[in-house]
């Protein structure tokens, strides 16, 4: 069974540039999560979906970050006008069902904003 | 305050020895997951517990939902056990949101 896949694996930007991250969850998993992991910290949830619906985006900086999952399968996380403080690894995870479901993580995209 | 308090922040072990990591939770927790993050950044699932204990090879984990803590024991440590270990809690009211601890950096030395 294929795991969660993400691309690109690395991205380097200048401040002010835009970037998109792509995630393909485990087949059949209806819930998809995006986490941000700054260096030497634990992952922190940004947003998550059940199917195509956003369940919680309260931790997503809405002025520059957006996330979509239009068909309830793959998802894209986009940063407009990146800042140095956005430097982190962006992790995608998926699970089946809400509440008490084990999450499985992709390899992440390591973003550096210069 | 932080929902998940993980300790120690770093741990150095000699091959063949054993040790334990601990996470304390400040709110009612439905389940806990333990991960190891390798040098490439991948989070590897070790355990998912809603209660009780689980064992997998030289690793054993326990979750006490009443006393609000979880432990991860490493027995007969091997070099490949090195990495950063995270616990992550799903609060009862969180709807599957995971809150991670700060991680424990484990280094196993020959």
Image (spheres, rainbow, N blue to C red):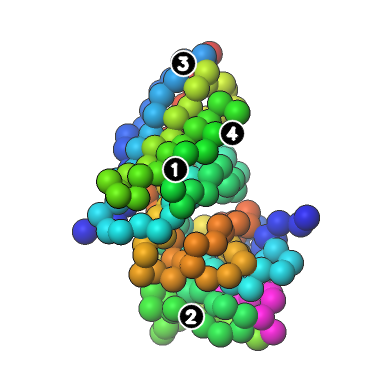
Is any part of residue A18 visible from this angle? no
Please tell me whether residue B55 is drawn above or below residue A55 in the rendered image: above
The reply to whether residue B61 is in sight is yes
Question: Hey, which quadrant is residue B91 in on the image?
Answer: bottom left
Range of magenta residues: A71-77
Q: Secondary structure at mark 1?
A: strand
Residue position for label 1:
B52
Whether tag 1 and tag 4 are in contact, CB under 8 A, the answer is: no
* CA distance separating discs 1 and 4: 14 Å
Residue with the mark numbered 3: B17
Q: Is residue B62 above or below residue A92?
A: above
Question: The disc numbered 2 marks a residue on which chain?
Answer: A
Counting residues from the start of the chain, the first of labels 4 and 3 encountered is 3
Q: Disc 4 sits on a residue from what chain?
A: B
Residue linked to disc 4 = B56
Which quarter of the rendered picture does the N terminus of chain A lie within? bottom right
Residue annotated with mark 2: A55
Residue lying at 37% horizontally and 65% vertically, measured from the top left: B92
Q: Secondary structure at mark 4?
A: strand
Q: Disc 2 to disc 1, how far (Cα)?
A: 30 Å
Dot 3: element? loop
Q: Position of residue B64 (x, y in %)?
A: 35, 45
CB within 8 Å, label 2 to label 1: no
Q: Residue furthest left?
A: B1
From the viewer's perspective, is the residue at label 2 or at label 1 nearer? 1
Question: Is residue A75 in the magenta section?
Answer: yes
The subunit letter for the residue under badge 1 reads: B
What is the CA distance from the residue labelled 1 to the residue labelled 3?
24 Å
At 44% across and 66% down in the image, what residue appears? B97
């Amino acid at each position: 069974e294929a795991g969660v896949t993400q691309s690109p694996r690395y991205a380097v930007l200048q401040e002010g540039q835009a970037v998109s991250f792509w995630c393909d969850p485990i087949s059949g998993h209806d819930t998809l999560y995006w986490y941000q992991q700054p260096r030497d910290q634990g992952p922190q949830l940004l947003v998550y979906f059940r199917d195509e619906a956003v369940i919680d985006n309260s931790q997503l900086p809405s002025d520059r970050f957006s996330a979509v999952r239009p068909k309830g399968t793959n998802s894209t996380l986009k940063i407009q006008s990146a800042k140095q403080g956005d430097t982190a690894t962006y992790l995608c995870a998926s699970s089946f069902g809400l509440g008490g479901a084990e999450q499985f993580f992709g390899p992440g995209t390591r973003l550096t904003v210069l | 305050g932080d929902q998940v308090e993980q300790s120690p922040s770093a741990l150095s072990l000699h091959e063949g020895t054993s040790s334990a990591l601990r996470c304390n939770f400040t709110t009612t927790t439905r389940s806990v997951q333990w991960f190891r993050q390798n040098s490439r950044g991948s989070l590897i699932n070790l355990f998912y517990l809603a209660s009780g204990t689980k064992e997998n090879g030289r690793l054993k984990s326990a979750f006490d939902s009443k006393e609000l803590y979880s432990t991860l024991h490493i027995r007969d440590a091997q070099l490949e056990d090195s990495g950063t270990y995270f616990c992550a809690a799903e609060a009862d009211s969180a709807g599957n949101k995971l809150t991670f601890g700060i991680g424990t950096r484990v280094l196993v030395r020959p």
